[in-house]
Amino acid sequence: MANRNLLHSAPDTVEGLRQAIQEHYAALSPRLQQVAELLLRDPQAVATEASRDLALGLQLPASTLTRFAKVMGYTTFRQIQALCKQQYVNLPRDYLDRIKRAQPTDTPQAAQPALYLDFAHAVQQSLQMTALELSEGKLREAATLLRGASEVWIHGMRRAFPVAAYLHYLLLKVGLRASLLDSAGGLLEPSLARLHAQGVLLVVTYSPHAAETEQVLERSRQLQVPVVAFSDPVPSPHAKDMRVLFAIREGEVMGFRALSTSMYVAQALAVQIAQDTIGAKQASVTTPARQVKAKLAAKQRQ
């Protein structure tokens, strides 16, 4: 299955390619999945490194990269690299310089920056990359879905819980009917009985995904509940069932992953909802006024 084209036409944006990978990941062979994971995890490396070096890092033959490109509808892997270069190579020069200075290689251990600065640099890089990748179209799509829901159920476990709790706060502040689906008091299973197709599930989940989250996503699939997800780029078996997926690469140091970028996307989504709500109210007020003016003008012409 992995040797045939999975797409009728090759995506012409990095975002489109990421979505295609999430949708068709299960259909790829193990080797092609390695290439897909590299693209999701580190697209800047794909943009800047030679394909032979990328293949060497993955311990794969260079022909595997070409095969991956053809499966995704391209002629060569260079076409994928060109897409990534358009988005990631022309970063602000001061950003590239700061990242370079943040990774000294020839200074004594005692002279290297403190560990808390490493965390700051990792968060900074994650925020910069996400700001480049986050599209207004995706924010508007998620905002429209959430605003049109009869109820929004928000779920996140363990590390994802702080982001879920913050989203709950934000959605209540912008006037949506929202509630948390958590395991407090052992009430997660009974709470799932409230799910229905007129609502929306807003889920926050990072790999490895919690068993409770897998349960919530499976129930939402059975009930055809639309899903908006905050997750990481690691392909999820539930990705194909998610209406909108924000794939977020958090900053990481020594295995500790931050939540700063997820909080940033949460704020951006809440502001988009607020802006759309205000715009809709203004339009509803303006339309009757225009109708009155049109009627008066028609009377004057008679």
Image (cartoon, helix red, strand yellow):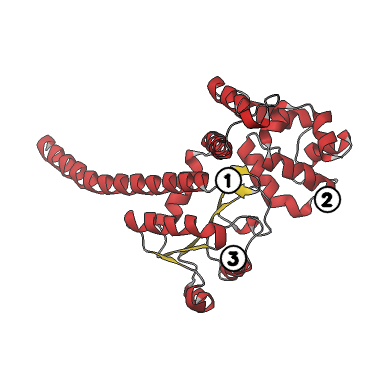
Q: Residue furthest front?
A: 110
Q: Secondary structure at mark 1?
A: loop
Q: Amino acid at mark 2?
A: Pro
Earlier residue among tags 2 and 1: 2
Earlier residue among tags 3 and 2: 2
Crowding around mark 3 (Cα neighbors within 10 Å: few <14, some 14 to 19, many 20+) is some
C-alpha separation, residue under disc 3 versus residue under disc 1: 17 Å
Crowding around mark 2 (Cα neighbors within 10 Å: few <14, some 14 to 19, many 20+) is few
- Whether residue 2 is visible, yes or no, is no
Can you tell which mark lies on residue 89?
A: none
Residue mark closest to the camera, 2 vs 1: 1
Instruction: Give percent across and percent down for residue 247.
Output: 59, 47
Instruction: Give percent across and percent down for residue 196.
Output: 49, 70
The residue closer to the viewer here, 301 or 41, is 41
Can you tell which mark lies on residue 248?
A: 1
Q: Amino acid at mark 3?
A: Thr
